[in-house]
Amino acid sequence: MKLWRGPLRAALALVLLPFLTPASAVEPISLGLAIAGAAASALTGFISYPRLYCYFRECCLQKHDRRAAAALQEDLDKKLFGQHLVSRVIVKAVKGFLNNSNAKKPLALSLHGWTGTGKNFVSKIVAESIYKRGLQSKYVHQFVATLHFPHAHSINLYKDQLQSWIRGNVSICPRSLFIFDEMDKMHAGLIDSIKPFLDYYEFLDGVSYQQAIFIFLSNAGAEKITEVALDFWRNGRTREDIQLSDIQNALSVSVFNNKNSGFWHSTLIDRNLIDYFVPFLPLEYKHVKMCIRVEIKSRGYAVDEDILTRIADEMTYFPREERIYSDKGCKTVDAKLDYYYDF
Ligand SMILES: Nc1ncnc2c1ncn2[C@@H]1O[C@H](COP(=O)(O)OP(=O)(O)OP(=O)(O)O)[C@@H](O)[C@H]1O
C-alpha cells in the first residue's frame, strides 16, 4: 500500500483538519492555505504515481510489456483459426520486441494473405494487447491507402504528411503503433518516405523511433501462399506441416517484384527493414464453420448446427476442382447470419 501513502495522507489531512483543530484556533486564511496545500499535495502525489494515474487515463506504454505479451498469446490462441504460422511469428516477434528495452530499430511486420483471412483481425489483437483501448487508442494510428492516399498526383504531399504524422506521434509516444492497410493499393514509392524511421538510427532530429511498431497489411503474395498451401494439400501433408521457411523468402521476393504491391522495388525490402513477412493461409471449410459459430455465439444465440452448415456451404471455395479454400475467408459470414437469424 506504499503507493497510496502520499496522496492518501494528504487527502486524509484535508478531511480531518477542521475537526482536529479547535474551531476558534483556525483562521479562515490558514484554513484556506491548509486546504489548498493538502489538495496540491494530494494531486501531485497522485500524478507522481504513473501506474495509478494510467489506470484512470490512457498513457503511452500503458500496459506492462510482459503482461501485453501474455495477453497477445492468449488472444491469438483463443480467437485466431487456421493460422499456426501467424500465431507463432506474431507472438515471437511482438513478445521479443516488447521485452527488449534495447531495440535497435522499430518492429516492422508485413502481413500478407487472401481477403478475410484475419490480417485486420490480428492487427486489432496486437493493438489491444498493448493498449487497453486497442484501435481506439490515441497511440494507435491506422492508415488506409485508398482513403488517406487516394491520388497519384499528390504523392509528394502524402510523403511529407506521412513523415510529419509519424514524427509528431512518436515524439508524443515512443511506443506508437502504425497500421498501414491496403498496401497493395498504395502508390509505389510512397512508403519509402518512411524508410529513415524504420532504419537503425538511435535518434533522428532528436526523436527515437526504436520503440515504435509498424504493421503493413496486403493481399499481395496471396497467390504464392496459396500455391504452397495447395502443394502441401496435394502431397497429402497437413497444413500445420507448413513452416515459415517454406514461404517467407518466396513471399518477400514476390511482393518486391509485384508492381501492385505498394512494396514494388521498395527500399524497405531491399534494405531488409521489414523484420517479418507473415503469411496468412487461405481458410478452409472447417475454419469458416468456426468463424460462423463464434459469430452466432457473440450475438447471444444458441448454435443451430443446420444453419451453421448451410451458411458454410453457401460460401464459395477454390480452386474450382478441389474447392478447399474459402474465397472470401471469413468475410461476409456476419452478413449471412442476418439472413438466417431473425435478430
Ligand atoms: N483466421 C481467422 N480466425 C478467426 N476469425 C477470422 C479469421 N479470419 C477472419 N476472421 C473473421 O473475419 C473478419 C474479417 O477478417 P479480416 O478483416 O481480418 O480480414 P483481412 O484478412 O484483413 O481481409 P482484407 O484483406 O479483405 O482486408 C474478422 O473480423 C474476423 O471476425
Image: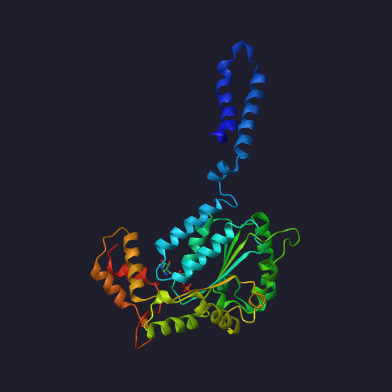
The percent position of residue 111, horizontal first and vertical second, equals 53, 72
Residue drawn at (52%, 55%) of the image: 68
Q: Work out whether residue 43 can be spotted.
A: yes
Classify 90 as above or below 61.
Answer: below
- Give the left or right position of residue 128, taking residue 48 as reference: left
- Give the left or right position of residue 132, taking residue 262 as reference: left
Classify 51 as above or below 318.
Answer: above
Residue 83, image quadrant? bottom left
Q: Work out whether residue 132 can be spotted.
A: no
The percent position of residue 256, horizontal first and vertical second, equals 60, 81
The percent position of residue 24, horizontal first and vertical second, equals 61, 11
Q: What colour scheme governs how the chains and residues are painted in the rendered image of this protein?
A: rainbow
Q: Quadrant of ligand 1?
A: bottom left
Residue 101, image quadrant? bottom right
**In the orientation shown, which residue stands out farthest toward the bottom?**
321
Residue toward you, 339 or 54: 54
Residue toward you, 278 or 180: 278
Q: How many marks?
A: 0
Residue toward you, 33 or 1: 1
Say which quadrant the C terminus sits in. Answer: bottom left
Residue drawn at (55%, 53%) of the image: 65
The percent position of residue 60, horizontal first and vertical second, equals 60, 52
Residue drawn at (51%, 66%) of the image: 90
Residue 19, image quadrant? top right
